[in-house]
Image (tube, helix red, strand yellow):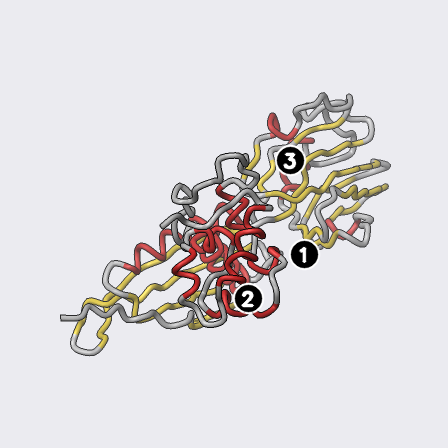
């Protein structure tokens, strides 16, 4: 009896509210709900890039245990508030943002001067409360990265005096949960429905997070389809040293051999796409193809020898 695997549905939006989204994928083959759900959850949490504050300079403050006169918050609290600001960074270059606040009042993320490459999603994020004639001057470095990076890793080189390095949580994801339930497909009731909940910090939408994670997974899996081609069958002519190794020969396309158009077309029609594939054929096997005769075989042998390859011996 033929075993047929039903393919799943595309993701369906159950709900999208602000930074939260719930999506469902139906008709997953039994067991595939957890296989797919767990894989996507791990990719979403570990592999989506984001931007955050990695270094801060506060005028007149040598380290994070100091204090600012006239500020209600300690330096540690101000740094924590800075880490709650959600950034979008266009491009991969680190950027510097700055803020100068004087006198009484609340300081929020809106007070930052931003270069064109930096956006702040939550401009109303509280930074500090100042009173009297207090002055707060902050310069912060925004960088792009993946996952969580402790400050020891970020600051391999010595930082300047007065520069405070921070642990960096780059991920734009707040949480990801999934659940699997059974559903009916045809006569069977043990197919899976995967429901996945994604909450972001607002710098990416939950839908973008899901789409990116699916694309990443497919991209990774595509890379491991098939086995590396072995060229052990290829016999090199005695006097010639091989020029092309295993991986090089698979990269050499038929078109690169500079054969006549007629021969190139005949080989490609026969499904022979690379020099490695050609070298696995014998002269007799090639002559069975339409448009390949003795003269064509001579031309092929000469072209292969330029790359240190030869046809298979009989």
Of 292 and 136, nearer the camera is 292
Of 75 and 154, nearer the camera is 154
Numbered circle sitting on residue 57: none
Asked whether the viewer can see residue 113, the reply is yes
Q: Secondary structure at mark 2?
A: helix
Q: CA distance from mark 1 to mark 2?
A: 60 Å
Q: Residues within 10 Å of mark 1 (few under 14, many from 20)?
A: some
Q: Badge 3 is on which residue?
A: 77
Numbered circle sitting on residue 263: 2
At x 48% / y 64%, what residue is drawn? 21
Q: Is residue 269 left or right of residue 134?
A: left
Q: Is residue 243 above or below residue 286?
A: above
Q: Secondary structure at mark 3?
A: helix
Q: CA distance from mark 1 to mark 3?
A: 20 Å
To which quarter of the image does residue 9 belong?
bottom left
Of badges 1 and 3, nearer the viewer stands: 1
Picture coordinates of residue 245, whole percent (x, y): 52, 40
At x 67% / y 50%, what residue is drawn? 87
Disc count in the image?
Answer: 3
Q: Badge 1 is on which residue?
A: 121
Q: Residues within 10 Å of mark 3 (few under 14, many from 20)?
A: some
The earlier-in-sequence mark between 1 and 3 is 3
Q: CA distance from mark 3 to mark 2?
A: 73 Å
Picture coordinates of residue 312, whole percent (x, y): 41, 49
Asked whether the viewer can see residue 223, the reply is no
At x 57% / y 54%, what residue is drawn? 201
The earlier-in-sequence mark between 1 and 2 is 1
Of 298 and 199, nearer the camera is 298
């Amino acid at each position: 009896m033929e075993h047929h695997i039903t393919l799943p549905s595309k993701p369906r939006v159950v709900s999208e509210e602000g930074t939260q989204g719930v999506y469902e994928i139906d008709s997953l083959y039994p067991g595939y709900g957890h296989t797919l759900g767990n894989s996507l959850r791990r990719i979403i949490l570990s592999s989506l890039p984001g931007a955050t504050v990695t270094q801060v300079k506060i005028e007149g403050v040598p380290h994070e245990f100091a204090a600012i006169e006239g500020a209600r918050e300690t330096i540690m609290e101000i740094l924590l508030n800075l880490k709650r600001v959600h950034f979008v960074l266009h491009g991969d270059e680190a950027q510097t943002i700055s803020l100068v606040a004087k006198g009484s009042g609340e300081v929020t993320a809106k007070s930052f001067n931003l270069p064109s490459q930096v956006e702040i999603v939550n401009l109303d994020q509280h930074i500090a409360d100042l009173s009297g004639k207090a002055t707060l001057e902050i310069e912060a470095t925004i960088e792009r990265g993946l996952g969580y990076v402790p400050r020891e890793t970020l600051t391999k080189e010595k930082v300047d005096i007065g520069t405070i390095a921070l642990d960096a949580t780059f991920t734009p994801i707040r949480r990801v949960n999934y659940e699997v339930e059974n559903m009916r497909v045809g006569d069977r009731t043990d197919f899976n429905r995967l429901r996945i909940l994604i909450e972001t910090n607002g710098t990416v939408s939950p839908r973008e997070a899901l789409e990116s994670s699916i694309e990443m997974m497919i991209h990774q899996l595509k890379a491991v389809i098939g086995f590396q081609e072995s060229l052990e069958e290829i016999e090199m002519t005695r006097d010639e040293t091989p020029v092309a190794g295993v991986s090089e020969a698979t990269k050499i396309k038929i078109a690169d051999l500079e054969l006549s158009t007629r021969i190139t077309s005949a080989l490609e029609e026969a499904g022979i796409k690379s020099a490695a594939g050609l070298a696995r054929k014998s002269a007799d096997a090639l002559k069975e193809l339409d448009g390949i005769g003795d003269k064509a075989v001579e031309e092929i042998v000469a072209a292969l020898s330029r790359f240190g390859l030869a046809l298979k011996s009989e």
